[in-house]
C-alpha cells in the first residue's frame, strides 16, 4: 500500500473519530429523549468560541478550553432543558422541531452579533503541531480529538450501562410514567441528560476549534454529519455512533481520494440510505 | 355597485400615485438596493461589502474636497439631482440564490429602489439580476466573475469587474513570464468548488489554457463548505503540479491552508483566484501559513494623500480592516451607478439605464486599477484590468506583475509557513 493511500485512511479514521466525538451528545438527546436537537451544530459552535475566548484571554489551549467549554455548555444544556425543551415536549412533534430550530438560529445570530462574521482560527501549534510516524503525517490536534472521542464514548457507555444514574436515565427514556412510579424524577434525569449531552458537545467544539476555522455558521457545516452519524450508528447507541463516525470518515476520505471530492457525498449518502434500507435501526440500535 | 367599486379603486390608485410622486420630489433621496451575504458562510464578505458601500455613501453624500477631482466627491449629494442624497437599503441574501431573489423582489416592489447592486456570489447575482431585468431596474455588479452573467442578453445588467476570461488571460501571460525567468510552470492543477463561481471560472481557465496550446489543468473539484479537504491535498501531493490555482471561497480557503500545513504540502507556486484569498479574515487567520501565495487584484492603495489612499483610510475606519480587492471592486461599481444616476439627472430607471450605457470613465476617475469603464452591448466593462499580487510577508499583498505595476519582484517558490 502506498504511503499516500495509508495517509488517506489514517486521515479518514481521525476524521471519523472527530465525527463520532461531536455526534455523541446528539445520540444521547435524540436517541434517548426522543428529541431532534437542531441546535446541536450550534452547541459545537459555542464550544469552539469558548476555546477561542480562552485562548485569546489566557493564551491557553484546549487543556483549559475543553473543560471550561464542557462546564459552560452543560449549563446551557440545563437552561435549555428547563427554559425550552420541557415546555415544547408537551406540544406536538412540529413544535419540538421548530423549537430547537429556533434555538439554533438564536444561538447563531447571537454569535454573529457578539463575535462578528469574521473567520477566526487558533494558532496551528496550539496542541503541538504535526509529527511523523512511519512516514505518515499526524496532526497532534486531530489525534488529541480522536483520543478524546474514544474516552468520551467509553465514558458515556459506562455511565449508561454500569451506573445507577445511567439506569435511571434509561428508565425515563423507556417509560417516563413508570419511572416516576419507581421514585425517579423524569425532569431531573432529562435535565442531567441534556447537561451531559451539551457538555460532551462543548468538549467536541473546543477540540475541533484547534484545527478548524471558527465562524457563527460553522454548526451548519458540521451538523449534517452528526445527524447521519447518529442514525447510522443507531439511535441512542454511543458505541454505534463511534463506529458509524469512523466508517463515514474512512469512506469519505477514500472516495474523495479515489473518485473525486465532488462525488464523496454521493458515495457516502447512497451507502447510508442503502444500509438503512436493510437495517433501519442502524449499526447498533435496538430493533 | 360593481362600477362604483372600480371607480373607487381607480380614485384610490390615482391618489396614491399622486402622493407617492410628490413625496419623492420633496424628500430628494435616491434609494438604491444592495444585496449581500450578511449571514451564512460568506457573511464576512458581506459585512465588508456593507462597509465599502457605506464608505462610498459618505463620499457621495458629504463634501470631500480632499479627494480632488474624484467623481461625486466635491459637493454633498448628487449635483445632477439638485444635491439629492443617496440612500442604500441593504438586504441579506443568506448565501442562497432563492433568498437573494426574494430580497430583490422585495427591494424593487416594496422599498421602491431605483437600482440594485450586489450580490457577491455569482450564483446569487445570477438570480437577483433576473428579477431586476424582469422589472426593468438597472443592476450594477462589481464583483461576480462567472462568465455567463453577461451572456444572457440582459438589457439592465452592467458588470464593472474584470471577469474570468480576463483573468485566464492574465494567468496565462503571468505563467509565461514566470517561465521565462526559469520557473517551471508546465503542469497546473485547478482546485475549485462546485458553486457557480468555482465551476465557471475553472471552465474558462481550462478552455483558455487549451486554446493557447497549454495542456489542460488537472481538475480537482470539491463540494463547497467542506468539512475536510485532506484527500484533495493528498491528490495534489501525489500529482506534484508545478502550479496550483485555487478557486475557493473563504471557509474552504482557510481549511486548505491549514490542511496543506498539516500534511506538509507546498506547491512550488500557489496562485489564488481572489475570493477567499482576498478576504481580510483569511489573511488574519492563515496569512502566516500562506506566505508567497499569488493572487489577482485590481486594487492598489497608491501613494499617501492620493484619493485611493484616502478612501482606503476611510474604509479602514469603517470596517476595522484593510481595504481589499473585493471591497474595492464593490465600491467602484457603486460609484459607477451613482455617477450614472447623477448624469441621468433623474431616478427614472430607463434614464439611468441610458446613462449607464453612455458611461465612459477614465483611469484617473477611478479608484480601481482598470483602464477605464465602458460597457459593451452585453453590459460588460471592456476596459477592466488587473494585476498579480503576492502575500510576501503573510500580512499584506504587494503588486508583482506586470512589471509596469510591480511594487516588488515575485518571490519563488511558495514558502507557506
Image (cartoon, coloured by chain):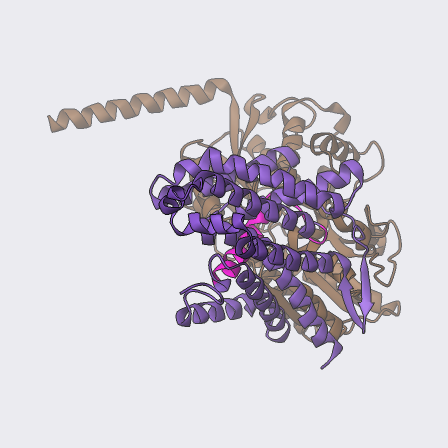
Residue B10 in the image, given as x and y percentages of width and height: 24, 26
Chain coloured brown in the rendered structure:
B
- Seen as rendered, the residue at the extreme front is A182
Seen in the picture, residue A58 relative to B236 is either above or below; the reply is above
Query: Which quarter of the figure has residue B318?
Result: top right
The span picked out in magenta is A210-231
If the image is split into quadrants, where does the N terminus of chain B sit?
top left
Query: Which quarter of the figure has residue B304?
Result: top right
If the image is split into quadrants, where does the C terminus of chain B sit?
bottom right
Q: Of residues B221 and B121, which is closer to you in this image?
A: B221
Residue B261 in the image, given as x and y percentages of width and height: 78, 60
Q: Is residue A243 visible?
A: yes
- Seen as rendered, the residue at the extreme top is B26
Residue B302 in the image, given as x and y percentages of width and height: 82, 40
- Main SS of the magenta part reads helix
x 78%, y 49%: residue: A123
How many discs appear?
A: 0
x 54%, y 33%: residue: B344
Residue A96 in the image, given as x and y percentages of width and height: 40, 43
Seen in the picture, residue A96 relative to B377 is either above or below; the reply is above
Q: Of residues B247 and B384, which is closer to you in this image?
A: B247
Colour chain A is painted in:
purple
Residue A216 counted in the magenta span: yes
Q: Is residue A215 visible?
A: no
Amino acid at each position: 500500500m502506498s504511503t499516500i493511500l495509508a495517509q488517506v485512511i489514517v486521515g479518514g479514521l481521525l476524521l471519523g473519530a472527530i465525527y463520532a466525538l461531536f455526534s455523541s451528545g446528539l445520540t444521547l438527546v435524540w436517541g434517548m429523549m426522543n428529541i431532534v436537537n437542531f441546535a446541536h451544530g450550534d452547541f459545537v459552535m459555542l464550544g469552539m468560541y469558548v476555546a477561542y475566548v480562552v485562548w485569546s484571554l489566557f493564551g491557553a489551549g484546549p487543556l483549559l478550553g475543553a473543560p471550561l467549554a464542557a462546564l459552560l455548555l452543560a449549563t446551557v444544556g440545563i437552561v435549555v432543558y428547563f427554559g425550552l425543551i420541557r415546555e415544547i415536549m408537551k406540544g406536538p412533534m412540529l413544535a419540538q422541531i421548530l423549537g430547537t430550530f429556533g434555538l439554533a438560529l438564536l444561538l447563531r445570530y447571537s454569535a454573529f452579533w457578539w463575535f462578528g462574521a469574521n473567520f477566526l482560527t487558533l494558532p496551528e501549534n496550539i496542541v503541538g503541531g504535526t509529527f511523523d510516524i512511519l512516514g505518515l503525517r499526524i496532526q497532534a490536534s486531530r489525534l488529541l480529538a480522536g483520543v478524546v472521542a474514544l474516552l468520551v464514548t467509553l465514558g458515556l457507555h459506562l455511565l449508561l450501562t454500569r451506573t445507577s444514574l445511567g439506569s435511571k436515565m434509561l428508565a425515563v427514556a423507556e417509560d417516563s410514567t413508570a419511572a416516576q412510579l419507581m421514585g425517579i424524577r423524569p425532569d431531573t434525569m432529562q435535565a442531567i441528560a441534556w447537561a451531559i449531552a451539551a457538555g460532551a458537545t462543548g468538549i467536541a467544539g473546543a477540540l475541533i476549534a484547534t484545527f478548524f476555522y471558527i465562524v457563527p455558521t460553522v454548526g451548519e457545516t458540521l451538523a449534517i454529519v452528526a445527524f447521519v452519524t447518529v442514525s447510522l450508528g443507531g439511535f441512542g447507541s454511543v458505541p454505534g455512533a463511534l463506529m458509524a463516525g469512523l466508517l463515514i470518515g474512512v469512506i469519505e476520505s477514500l472516495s474523495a481520494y479515489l473518485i473525486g471530492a465532488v462525488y464523496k457525498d454521493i458515495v457516502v449518502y447512497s451507502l447510508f440510505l442503502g444500509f438503512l434500507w436493510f437495517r433501519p435501526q442502524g449499526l447498533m440500535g435496538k430493533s | 355597485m360593481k362600477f362604483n367599486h372600480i371607480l373607487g379603486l381607480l380614485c384610490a390608485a390615482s391618489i396614491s400615485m399622486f402622493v407617492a410622486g410628490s413625496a419623492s420630489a420633496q424628500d430628494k433621496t435616491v434609494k438604491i438596493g444592495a444585496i449581500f451575504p450578511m449571514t451564512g458562510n460568506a457573511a464576512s464578505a458581506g459585512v465588508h461589502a456593507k462597509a465599502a458601500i457605506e464608505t462610498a455613501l459618505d463620499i457621495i453624500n458629504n463634501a470631500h474636497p480632499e479627494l480632488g477631482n474624484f467623481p461625486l466627491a466635491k459637493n454633498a449629494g448628487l449635483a445632477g439631482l439638485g444635491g439629492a442624497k443617496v440612500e442604500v437599503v441593504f438586504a441579506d441574501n443568506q448565501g442562497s440564490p432563492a433568498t437573494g431573489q426574494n430580497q430583490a423582489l422585495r427591494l424593487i416592489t416594496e422599498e421602491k429602489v431605483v437600482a440594485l447592486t450586489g450580490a457577491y456570489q455569482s450564483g446569487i447575482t445570477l438570480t437577483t439580476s433576473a428579477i431586476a431585468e424582469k422589472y426593468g431596474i438597472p443592476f450594477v455588479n462589481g464583483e461576480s466573475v462567472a462568465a455567463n452573467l453577461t451572456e444572457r442578453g440582459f438589457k439592465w445588467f452592467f458588470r464593472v469587474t474584470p471577469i474570468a476570461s480576463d483573468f485566464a488571460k492574465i494567468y496565462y501571460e503571468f505563467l509565461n513570464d514566470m517561465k521565462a525567468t526559469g520557473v517551471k510552470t508546465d503542469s497546473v492543477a485547478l482546485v475549485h468548488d462546485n458553486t457557480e463561481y468555482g465551476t465557471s471560472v475553472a471552465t474558462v481557465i481550462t478552455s483558455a489554457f487549451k486554446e493557447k496550446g497549454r495542456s489542460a489543468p488537472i481538475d480537482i473539484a470539491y463540494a463547497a463548505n467542506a468539512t475536510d479537504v485532506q484527500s484533495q491535498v493528498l491528490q495534489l501531493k501525489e500529482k506534484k503540479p508545478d502550479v496550483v490555482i485555487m478557486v475557493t471561497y473563504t471557509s474552504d480557503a482557510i481549511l486548505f491552508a491549514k490542511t496543506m500545513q498539516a500534511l506538509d504540502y507546498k506547491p512550488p507556486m500557489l496562485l489564488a483566484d481572489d475570493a477567499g484569498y482576498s478576504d481580510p479574515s483569511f489573511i488574519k487567520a492563515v496569512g502566516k501559513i500562506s506566505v508567497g501565495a499569488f493572487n489577482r487584484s485590481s486594487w492598489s492603495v497608491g501613494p499617501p494623500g492620493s484619493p485611493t489612499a484616502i478612501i482606503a483610510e476611510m474604509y479602514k475606519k469603517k470596517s476595522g480592516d484593510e481595504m481589499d480587492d473585493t471591497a474595492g471592486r464593490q465600491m467602484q461599481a457603486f460609484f459607477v451607478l451613482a455617477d450614472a444616476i447623477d448624469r441621468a439627472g433623474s431616478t427614472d430607471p430607463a434614464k439611468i439605464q441610458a446613462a449607464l450605457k453612455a458611461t465612459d470613465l477614465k483611469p484617473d476617475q477611478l479608484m480601481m486599477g482598470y483602464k477605464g469603464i465602458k460597457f459593451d452591448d452585453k453590459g460588460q466593462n471592456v476596459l477592466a484590468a488587473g494585476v498579480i499580487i503576492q502575500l510576501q510577508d503573510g500580512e499584506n499583498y504587494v503588486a508583482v506583475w506586470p512589471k509596469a505595476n510591480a511594487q516588488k519582484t515575485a518571490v519563488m517558490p511558495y514558502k507557506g509557513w
